[in-house]
Amino acid sequence: MKDTNLIDHSSLSRLIAEKIAEDIITGRLKSGDKLIEANYAEEFGTSRAPIREAFYLLAIDGLVDRIPRKGSIIRGYSEKDIIDLIEIRMTLEALAMDRIAINGISETLIKVMEELVLKMESIQENTIEYTNLNQEFHLGIIDMSKSEIIRMMYLRLGLPLLSLQRVSFGGEGSIKQSLKEHIVILDNLKRHNFDEAKMVLMKHNQNVLKHFPLKQTETK
């Protein structure tokens, strides 16, 4: 028989971790901010045990650093970290596009991506919502590859990539440019112009760095 308290404890920890992750992704929590167990224990009306577990889950997701004698700190990303994340994303998406060229497109996923583009067009002023829809669009490309390995590796980028993407969309004109590129990628997929779709997709990813508020100007 399963321990109900253990299940409840695990569920609460995940709930708390998701709430903190949302605050990080939306920018309410900044790089370097310290997470205080007592504060969250009071907010959620619980002991410190599930809070501590939530911090551990956030560390696994790559959003928090657990530093001895300092506690849990919102992770900051160096220029090298950011470039690495984007280049890994580019590699996996390029590989996914190669698989799509071999296996063909999924009409079901194409329709889903078309709906996502329509939603993205309607909420261009909402950076957070646009970021979430953007992630769904790119996952459509990954899923269309029909590769569980590519999908598994891509999902490992998860929340850190989402957090960085949200910051990049704060750059002037970045959402407008991003939307235009999504439309071109989708159009080329529908026309089976896979090489062109891949080329635009790679440029699309490189543009994330251009709109990021750091000094990097080129990838490695």
Image (cartoon, rainbow, N blue to C red):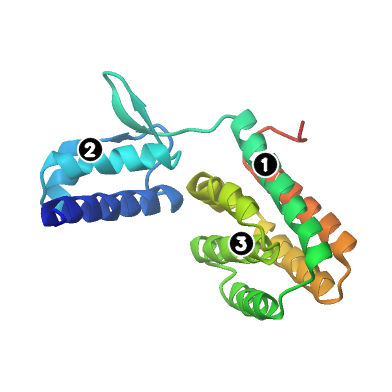
For badge 2, the amino acid type reads Arg
| Residue at 28% in and 22% down | 70
Q: Pick the residue in front: 49 or 74.
A: 49
Label 2 SS: helix
Looking at the picture, does residue 220 appear above or below residue 185? above
- Measure how far apart labels 1 and 3 are at the Cα level: 14 Å
For badge 3, the amino acid type reads Leu
Image quarter hosting the C terminus: top right
| Residue at 30% in and 19% down | 68
Specify which label sits upstream in the sequence, 3 or 2.
Answer: 2
- Measure how far apart labels 3 and 2 are at the Cα level: 31 Å
Specify which label sits upstream in the sequence, 1 or 3.
Answer: 1
Q: Using residue 111 as the reference point, say whether residue 28 is left or right of it.
A: left
Residue 7 visible in the shown view: yes
Q: Using residue 154 as the reference point, say whether residue 196 is left or right of it.
A: right
Specify which label sits upstream in the sequence, 1 or 2.
Answer: 2
Residue 171 visible in the shown view: no
- Measure how far apart labels 1 and 2 are at the Cα level: 30 Å
Q: Which residue is mark 1?
A: 88
Q: Using residue 1 as the reference point, say whether residue 36 is left or right of it.
A: right
| Residue at 50% in and 66% down | 129
For badge 1, the amino acid type reads Ile
Q: Pick the residue in front: 5 or 192.
A: 5
Image coordinates for residue 107, horizontal then vertical, percent: 71, 80
Image coordinates for residue 12, horizontal then vertical, percent: 21, 54
| Residue at 40% in and 31% down | 32
Q: Which residue is mark 3?
A: 139
Q: Are marks 1 and 2 in contact (CB under 8 Å)?
A: no
Dot 1: few (<14), some (14–19), or many (≥20) neighbours within 10 Å? some
Q: Which residue is mark 2?
A: 52
